Structures are given as structure tokens and as C-alpha cells.
Image (cartoon, rainbow, N blue to C red):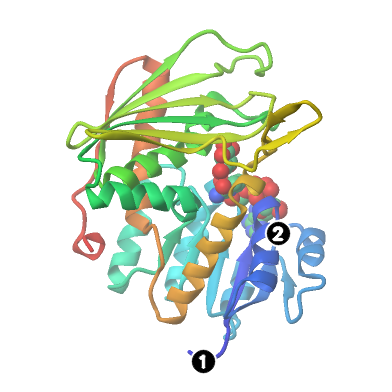
Amino acid sequence: MSRNLSVAVIGAGRMGVDHIQRLARRTHGAEVSAVVDIDPARAAAAAAGVPGAAALTDIRAALEDPRTDAVLIATPGFLHEDALHAALARDIPILCEKPLTPDSVSAWRVLQAEEKLGRKRIQVGFMRRYDAEYAHLAELIRSGELGELLMLHHQHRNPATPPGFSNEMLINDSVVHEFDAVRFFSAEEITSVRVRTGKTTRNAPAGMNDPQQVLMETTSGVLADVEIYVNAQYGYEVGTQAVFEQGVVRIGNHAGPYLSARGRWGGTVLPGFAERFSAAYDREIQSWVDAALQGDIGGPSAWDGYAAAACCEAGVEAQKTGRTVAVELHEKPLLYQS
Ligand SMILES: NC(=O)C1=CN([C@@H]2O[C@H](COP(=O)(O)OP(=O)(O)OC[C@H]3O[C@@H](n4cnc5c(N)ncnc54)[C@H](O)[C@@H]3O)[C@@H](O)[C@H]2O)C=CC1
Ligand SMILES: O=C1[C@@H](O)[C@H](O)[C@@H](O)[C@H](O)[C@H]1O
């Protein structure tokens, strides 16, 4: 395809608007042809100032338009399945924000629909894989330079939760990224999950345990833990310490620059994920567009979305029961083995 990839963006909320700006202003080879939101005012506001972008309220109208080459889904997770099936029926490239779907049964249905097409059409929005430090750590692991990877310690801190955020969302909305990160770094599946709750911050909404510790193990026995703390108040921090046979690698948390001034030294804590992962989102979308123009996908697949959904399910059960819960996965279809 020599012309730009015409993308219909479904959902013009926080992430949708961010991706529309990215596609329209910072991505090569793409343009936004439609913005779809159930709320017409949101669709119109997001499409305003984007040349050629139609404001629509129904995904079907975007998919019926022959100009639509690809879709980016940024509606809430519980709406992803319908949008995915509709876009798969058009056999066009899809970037679906995380989660692929909220549970492993619906994720498997999506994966089977894609398998029938005989090619990968869906990329899942696990953008951390595109963060420069994440990519560097993955390269170090693959190179074997420091020996075998043995353990991963993660911290994931958000300043505060939006209204309605629950214990389950802490796993499904937040730790879903670490499930993907552990699978990405270890290049293995996660076999079990355990969740520990302890003393809770007074800043958490009633009924929520915050922080929590999520413990997991991979096929070869790599142990990983996550401190998930979603009302940490002071800012947004995401970091990992990877322990190898011959060394330790730290990424995230305290990236510079460090300032020495006014009798103090130090850096800045970023306010949220949009700032922390801004460059990663840019790379993620560029990689998807580049691959889509070649009829491929550029990153995490529907299998990765399905496996993460299965981990989340195990995580929520572990959270409720206090038990170590096994992650159950179907056999990996051939399509996803390379
Ligand atoms: N990769 C990342 O770091 C992040 C990913 N996300 C993911 O992005 C997705 C969207 O999240 P947010 O932008 O925070 O949500 P949001 O609530 O800000 O926006 C969702 C939008 O979808 C619209 N919508 C609802 N039903 C619709 C329908 N049937 N058709 C079309 N539009 C509809 C809503 O009116 C709203 O404008 C979620 O899957 C979320 O998990 C969210 C935050 C960060
Ligand atoms: O996906 C995201 C949010 O939905 C989630 O609530 C945050 O915890 C994550 O850090 C962010 O990347």
C-alpha cells in the first residue's frame, strides 16, 4: 500500500484522544479517517482539527466505509470483544488497547475467529514492550550476557484511583501489564499466581486493599513479584529489578535527569502513565502502522492478550481465596508459534 493507512479510532476517551493526536501528528504513513464514540459530542470534539476525520457514533458506519484500512479500539475493555469480531469480519489490521477482552473465554473466541482468517490481524496495546528500557532489558536477557534470568521484582504505583476502581481492577487494569511484562521478559508462560494483601493505606477507597503483592512463577521457575500500589499519592512509578546469575539490572523508577540546584539534588516523579510511557506509545503505534502497511502486526498478538487474560483470571481468584492459583491455557495454535 503506497498511500497512508486510514485508521478508524473507536472510543474517544482518554486513550482514544491521545492515540488520535499521535496518529494525526506524530505517526508516519497514517491518517485518522473516522472517530467513533457513542457520545456524539466526544466524537466531534476529537475529530475537530484532524483533517479528513469523520465523527461517527457507531463502529458499523466506520467499518462499512471502504476507506477504512484499519481500526484502533480504545473503548472500555468489556466492549472490546464485539468491536474485535466486527473488525475481524472485515479482515483488516487492528490495534486493541489492553485488555484484549476481560476474560479468557471471550479472548479465546476472538483468537479462534482470527485463526480462521489464517493470519494475525490483532495487536494488543501492551505498550511497555516499546519502552526503551524494557526493550534493552529484553535484549540483555536474550543475549545471555548475564547468565540466566532468575527473578523479576516489579513496582507499579499510581497516584490515585478513579471512582469505581475495585480490587479486581487492580489486577485486570493494572497488573495485566506486569503479566505481559513477565511473559515478555522470560519468553515463557506464567504457570501460577498468588496475591497477598496486608496493611492498607488510608488513602484507598473503602473495601480496597492497597497495596497488594502479586507473586507468580513461569514455566522454568523464574519467580516474579509485583508491588501494586494504586493510591500511592506521590506520582506514577513503574520499575523492575531483574536478577540474573551474574548481575542485576534495574529499569524504570528513577530515570534522569537529576538536577542539583537550590541546595538540593534530585529528579522528578512523573504524574501518570501518559507522561511515563509517551515515547513507548509513539513507538507502539508507529510499529503497528508500519506492519499494517505490510499486511502484518508489529507486536503483542491475540495470544499474548489471551494469556494475559488467563493470568488476570487466576490473579482475581488468588486475590479472593488467598490460594496459589494455576494459570490454565489452551494449547497454543500454530499461527501464534512464531
Ligand atoms: N495502555 C495503557 O497504558 C492504557 C490503556 N487503557 C485502555 O484503553 C481503553 C480505554 O480506556 P480510557 O481511554 O481510559 O477510557 P475512557 O472511559 O476515557 O474512554 C472510553 C470512551 O469509549 C466511549 N464508548 C463507550 N461505549 C462506546 C461504544 N459502544 N462505541 C464507541 N465508543 C464508546 C466512551 O464514550 C468514552 O469516550 C481501555 O481498554 C483501557 O484499559 C487505559 C489507560 C492506559
Ligand atoms: O493501563 C493503565 C491504566 O489503565 C492502569 O490503571 C495503570 O495502572 C497502568 O499503569 C496504565 O498503564
Does mark 2 have its CB less than 8 Å from ligand 1? Answer: yes
Q: Secondary structure at mark 2?
A: helix
Does mark 1 have its CB less than 8 Å from ligand 1? Answer: no
Q: Is residue 205 above or below residue 85?
A: above
Give neighbour class at mark 2: few <14, some 14-19, many 20+ (Cα, 10 Å). many
Give x and y (percent) for residue 83: 52, 61
Q: Nearer the viewer, residue 330 or 174?
A: 174
Q: Nearer the viewer, residue 211 or 122?
A: 211
Q: Which amino acid type corresponds to the residue marked 2 in the rendered image?
A: Val
**Is residue 90 something one can see in this rendering?**
no
Give x and y (percent) for residue 20: 68, 65
Q: Which mark is residue 292?
A: none
Residue wearing tag 1 = 2
Q: Is residue 101 above or below residue 87?
A: above
Q: Which mark is residue 17?
A: 2
Q: Residue at x 30, y 60 (%)?
A: 112
Q: Residue at x 47, y 56 (%)?
A: 130
Give x and y (percent) for residue 132: 48, 53
Q: Earlier in the sequence, mark 2 or mark 1?
A: 1
Q: Which amino acid type corresponds to the residue marked 1 in the rendered image?
A: Ser
Give x and y (percent) for residue 42: 78, 59
Q: Residue at x 74, y 26 (%)?
A: 264
Q: Residue at x 56, y 90 (%)?
A: 3
- Lateral position of residue 245 relative to residue 32, left or right: left
**CA gap, disc 2 and disc 1:** 26 Å
Q: Quadrant of ligand 2?
A: top right
Q: Quadrant of residue 258?
A: top right
Q: Is residue 268 above or below residue 17?
A: above
Q: Is residue 193 above or below residue 184?
A: above
- Lateral position of residue 54 relative to residue 175, left or right: right
